[in-house]
Image (tube, helix red, strand yellow):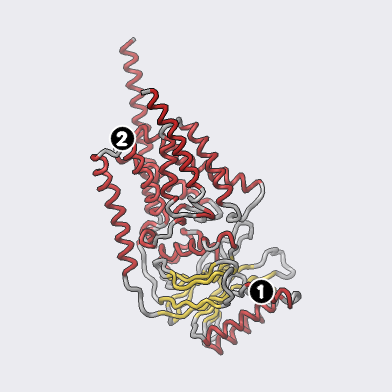
């Protein structure tokens, strides 16, 4: 028996090695969707054979090492603070594994499999609610299977995270019971059937007919080669050349049948004193070409106490009216803070059109406000960098599935793309491989209401409530056990 126990402990380090390897593909720059399912299986298995403190040490080191590599250049920070953040992320995640390790000793039956996914959802819910990066880096964003991702329309990212980690927990529960036939049958009904229903729901939702009425939306981004020509030939008039190019492309887009035209984040760069004059030029084009134009602008302050440019988008109607101006509400950490946090929209013959800007789309709770607005199409100027391309654009697409709107994201230095409210790609254009300035998207004009848009984060709160309840149960059980031990000792004495 002792030799058998030693063999299992030695084997556990092999499980740790496998889990550690898959951590490099678990999230970040080398994402493999299947790795998010596999890595937790072996890390949980490793912990079954070691005391919590020792296990925590191993997991924190593994998490720190993998985090340093997989998040390199994907986080807009560097230096010592980067390594501190990677350590904090590793500790926070490792604690969820340790809690599962402790609870697995105290709980019997299939209910124990719900602990790990619930506590992980709790951890991510706290992170998303308090982290200035929002949902950026959350586990659900590692997935790309559209049938599976339709779960977003019901539970948000929390349900996707739960299923991933519930899978690891269930497999370990079966492993603990040597894959006994009885427990296999039990897991078939309690795990396999719900997962099958989720996938069937996704297939049915994807098969549903999207409205045939579409509108052509043109998203403009000055291509890399043209930018270089402007820098080389007009070093003293870079902004003026960029601004003029945008106006030229608006006219070209209108000739190609576009009815809504907007650009990438900050494609227009003007001073606060020149903004009014430039907007008047755009109004003239909107009237002439009978199009709606969205102006993503960086407004540079002149003789003002404000030190950072104002990042905003202004929409102009075919009649030359300013429909709304929206200021970026969730800037990339370090940019500063703007806006009042209220998404704006306008009604058009092509549906209700709203806008957010780049990093705003990383915050599910912020986007939840569009439910009461009944927005059909979200137009999102963005500005990324190579390391987060195409990851960041697909993060934005999750909000479309959650809230039921169609999405067009115009991205400088990244992936421009349009999506249906089911996450299906309508068109895309990579800044690093394309020399085209305009991405055309024929976008459905009618969005839809989703369960998640109505109920919000109810699933996350259910997970939190379950974990609190089971923690109370475990605590009571432990107190009773200690009392029984004391009574037995008294009887012996």
Q: SS for tag 1?
A: helix
Q: Is residue 134 left or right of residue 375?
A: right
Residue denoted by label 2: 108
Residue 328: name its quadrant: bottom right
Image x and y of residue 133, in percent: 55, 55
Instruction: Using the image, determine if residue 218 lies above or below residue 57.
Output: below
Image x and y of residue 287, in percent: 55, 88
Residue denoted by label 1: 227
Between the residue at mark 1 and the residue at mark 2, the CA separation in whole angstroms equals: 63 Å
Instruction: Using the image, determine if residue 346 lies above or below residue 201.
Output: below
Please name whichever residue, 345 or 355, is drawn nearer the observer in this view of the structure.
355
Image x and y of residue 439, in percent: 52, 76
Mark 1, Cα crowd under 10 Å, few <14 / some 14-19 / many 20+, is some
Frontmost of labels 1 and 2 is: 1
Which residue occupies 50% across, 31% down? 54
Instruction: Using the image, determine if residue 233 lies above or below residue 338.
Output: below
Which residue occupies 31% across, 53% down? 195
């Amino acid at each position: 028996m002792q030799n058998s126990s030693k063999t299992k402990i030695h084997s556990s380090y092999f499980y740790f090695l496998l889990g550690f390897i898959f951590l490099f593909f678990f999230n970040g720059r080398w994402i493999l969707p299947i790795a998010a399912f596999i890595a937790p299986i072996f890390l949980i298995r490793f912990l079954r054979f070691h005391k919590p403190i020792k296990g925590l040490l191993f997991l924190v080191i593994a998490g720190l090492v993998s985090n340093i590599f997989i998040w390199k250049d994907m986080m807009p920070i560097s230096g010592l603070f980067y390594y501190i953040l990677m350590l904090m992320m590793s500790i926070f995640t490792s604690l969820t594994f340790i809690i599962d390790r402790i609870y697995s000793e105290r709980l019997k039956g299939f209910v124990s499999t719900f602990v790990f996914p619930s506590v992980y959802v709790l951890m991510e819910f706290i992170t998303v609610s308090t982290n200035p990066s929002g949902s950026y880096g959350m586990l659900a964003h590692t997935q790309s299977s559209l049938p599976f991702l339709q779960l977003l329309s019901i539970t948000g990212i929390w349900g996707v995270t739960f299923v991933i980690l519930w899978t690891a927990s269930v497999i370990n529960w079966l492993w603990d019971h040597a894959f006994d036939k009885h427990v296999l049958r039990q897991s078939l009904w309690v795990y396999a059937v719900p997962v099958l229903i989720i996938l069937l729901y996704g297939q049915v939702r994807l098969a549903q007919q999207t409205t045939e009425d579409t509108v052509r939306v043109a998203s403009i981004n000055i291509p890399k080669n043209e930018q270089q020509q402007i820098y080389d030939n007009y070093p003293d008039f870079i902004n003026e050349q960029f601004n003029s190019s945008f106006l030229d492309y608006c006219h070209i887009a209108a000739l190609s049948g576009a009815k809504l035209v907007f650009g990438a984040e900050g494609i227009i760069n003007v001073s606060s004193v020149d903004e009014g004059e430039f907007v008047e030029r755009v109004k003239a084009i909107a009237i002439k070409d009978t199009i709606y134009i969205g102006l993503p602008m960086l407004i540079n302050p002149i003789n003002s106490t404000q030190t950072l440019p104002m990042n905003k988008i202004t929409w102009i109607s075919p009649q030359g009216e300013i429909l709304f101006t929206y200021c970026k509400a969730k800037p990339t950490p370090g940019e500063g803070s703007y806006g009042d946090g209220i998404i704006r929209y306008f009604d058009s013959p092509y549906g209700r059109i709203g806008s957010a800007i780049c990093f705003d789309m990383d915050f599910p709770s912020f986007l939840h406000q569009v439910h009461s607005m009944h927005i059909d199409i979200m137009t999102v100027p963005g500005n990324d960098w190579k390391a987060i391309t195409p990851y960041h654009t697909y993060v934005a697409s999750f909000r479309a599935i959650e809230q039921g709107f169609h999405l067009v994201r115009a991205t400088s230095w990244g992936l421009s793309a349009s999506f249906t409210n089911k996450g299906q790609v309508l068109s895309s254009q990579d800044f690093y491989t394309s020399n085209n300035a305009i991405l055309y998207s024929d976008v459905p004009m009618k969005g839809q209401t989703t369960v998640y848009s109505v109920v919000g984060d109810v699933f996350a709160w259910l997970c939190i409530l379950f974990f609190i309840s089971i923690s109370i149960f475990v605590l009571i059980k432990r107190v009773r056990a200690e009392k029984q031990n004391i009574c037995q000792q008294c009887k012996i004495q």
